Image: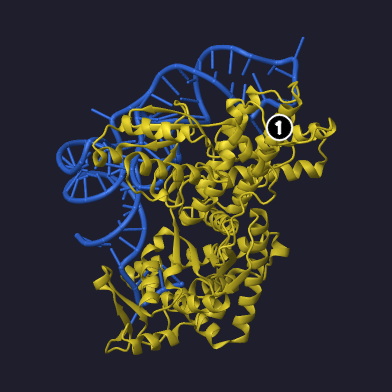
Amino acid sequence: MNLNEYIQGALAAALQQEFAIEVAAADLVLQPTKKEFEGFYTFVCFPYAKQLKKSPVEIGTKLGEYLVAENGPVSAFNVVQGFLNLSISDQVWLELFATIHGNENYGQLPDKGQKVMVEYSSPNTNKPLHLGHLRNNFLGYSIAEILKMGGYEVMKTNVVNNRGIHICKSMLAYQLFGNNETPATSDIKGDHLVGKYYVEFDKAYKAQISELVEGGMEKEKAEKEAPLLKQAEAMLLKWEEGDPATIGLWEMMNSWVYAGFDETYKKMGVNFDKIYYESDTYLLGKDIIEEGLEKGVFYRRPDNSVWIDLTADGLDEKLVLRSNGTSVYITQDLGLADLKAEDFPMQKSVYVVGNEQDYHFKVLFLIMQKLGRPYASGLYHLSYGMVDLPSGKMKSREGTVVDADDLMQEMNDTAEEMTKELGKIDGFTEEEAKALYHTLAMGALKYFLLKVDPKKRMLFNPQESVDFQGNTGPYIQYNHARIRSILRKAAQLELTPTAPAAIDLHSSERDLIFTLSQFPQRVEDAGNMYSPALIAQYAYDLAKTYSQFFSEVPIFAEENLDKKQFRVALSKAVAEVIRKAMGLLGVTAPERM
RNA sequence: GGUCCCAUAGCUCAACCGGAUAGAGCAACUGCCUUCUAAGCAGUAGGUUGCAGGUUCGAGUCCUGCUGGGAUCACCA
């Protein structure tokens, strides 16, 4: 039963009967009634006032009377200004609850028969993951889970940037200064070790530039002429030729990085169905250049470079192939788009990439449209804002980058500290306690990063950003743990969670059923808007509503058995939905905390 | 300079297709643990939604201009 749709239908009928106007039921705006008014659903009457030449209050009253008179779900109404507020009978709330209570798959939307690919993470193999990557990974994982629950078949992919000049820089620095150290001999995690040499390169390179500048060279020229850069470029050429020594070094260092990333991904709790490596895909896309030239989408300049003119679309002219015939960034993205569609024929393809690449994706998608790719209309750039620090933007050169591994470890420590302080781990084994710290740490961190609208840039203060109280992951986790505790006790008392046919409801019980009933729609909305933030807000809303119920309504002290069993059932349903909603954010809901 | 994004309470964030007196959390203050987990609940205080116009029954939301911040405009990725 979908109350929302039912009421829309009834309102449409009422408008027809009472005022003889035809409105499509789906077009009727129904919003949740504000807390300070009586009712659950509100219909705004203003839009019809002009058309009907009647006051909104009069319209609302007529509609309200009609809805109550039909003896349906609407038990009462009130009209405030032009707002028609509708109350729902307890009978209907209980029927609604019965459909939720018995349903293991509650929230899972019907199969849409469509495939979606979600690309996220997509790291460079020359440095470890940082705070910005955390937002990316959590977003990507979450939106993939949301789309799954929304009825799509989802493939999660990761495009690893494991080649190119920047990789050669760390390889070169390692060759020069590495003394053959390895993650094992240095006790440094593989990705951090490689990152260290990327920094080493930059230092030495800068030193060379200053030297050249002191020797009288212009800075710009020095940046291009520095021997280290020349060496790195030479190394890239060797790599492309397949020089065994270069490839060997590359493979060794990459394997360190992959091992390091795997560890970090595991801690983050994210995973992928398919990984693309740029070393395999960087030559793709050249045939598309030919195709585009034939179709007249691209044009060739006298120097042999290939371009697309997007000025008619409000963009610029864009290079798609260099004059020497080699690829640029977008060339391989064109090829990769086709490869993805071939591997997984999808209706939608989501790229989780920061908003500094908005322009790139506009161009990419536009080109795919012009080339007539059938999947082009389903391409979507999930563009998210940067994560700023109190000191401003993260800058690797200034050492202000917040490392992902470090941050997760700090969160773990904080969780441990707080949990011990609160004396919450009596009866936990060492292992259980550790697992809980991790669950809480990741819950806090993921919730913090996901509750904000992805499009917006956000601020992260390492000292104080991640709290464990109020609108936080642990608050929601806490409510889940409390319910699990109640359910354990209910089982001991041999109480059967039951959805009763007829009892009087407490107002906080109605609130809970109402909130529970919103879940499927929220999953749908979050998928359509590509916004885990909607799920985060929902989870908080549900937990908060439960918390209120918990403090206002007794469960085991209730004498009426029907009510007692109902409250257990209601609690159980809330725990289930909290667990599912948090699962959509990649957050685990603990049994105890 | 062109294009795009952002600006809401002291701080971090909400506000669904334009709807009621703009909501939460943190920080501050006041109550509430002999009862199902106080990582909690209830309450107080905190706002000219950057500024100026416009559109309309109604604007944080749409339009124009301005101010401030950011991104991007490489034969880099």
Percent from the top left, x then y, of residue A450? 53, 48
**Number of numbered discs visible in the structure rendering:** 1
- State the blue chain: B
Q: Of A571 and A266, which appears nearest the observer?
A: A571
Residue A26, above or below B23: below
**Quarter of the C terminus of chain A within the rendering:** top right
Tag 1: residue type? Phe
Side (left or right) of A315 relative to A278: left
Residue A25, above or below A516: below
Question: Element type at marker 1?
Answer: helix
Q: Quadrant of residue A541?
A: top right
Q: Of A75 and A263, which appears nearest the observer?
A: A75
How many neighbours does mark 1 have within 10 angstroms: few (below 14), some (14-19), or many (20 or more)? many
Chain A tint in image: yellow
Q: Of A542 and A247, which appears nearest the observer?
A: A542
The chain that hosts pointer 1 is: A
Point 77% across, 41% down: residue: A433
Point 70% across, 45% down: residue: A102
Percent from the top left, x then y, of residue A163? 54, 75
Side (left or right) of A77 relative to A141: left
Report if residue A26 is visible in the image: yes
Report if residue A593 is visible in the image: no
Side (left or right) of A415 relative to A462: right
Percent from the top left, x then y, of residue A120? 54, 63
Specify how the rendered protein is coloured: by chain
Percent from the top left, x then y, of residue A324? 38, 87
Q: Which residue is mark 1?
A: A566
Residue B34, above or below A388: above
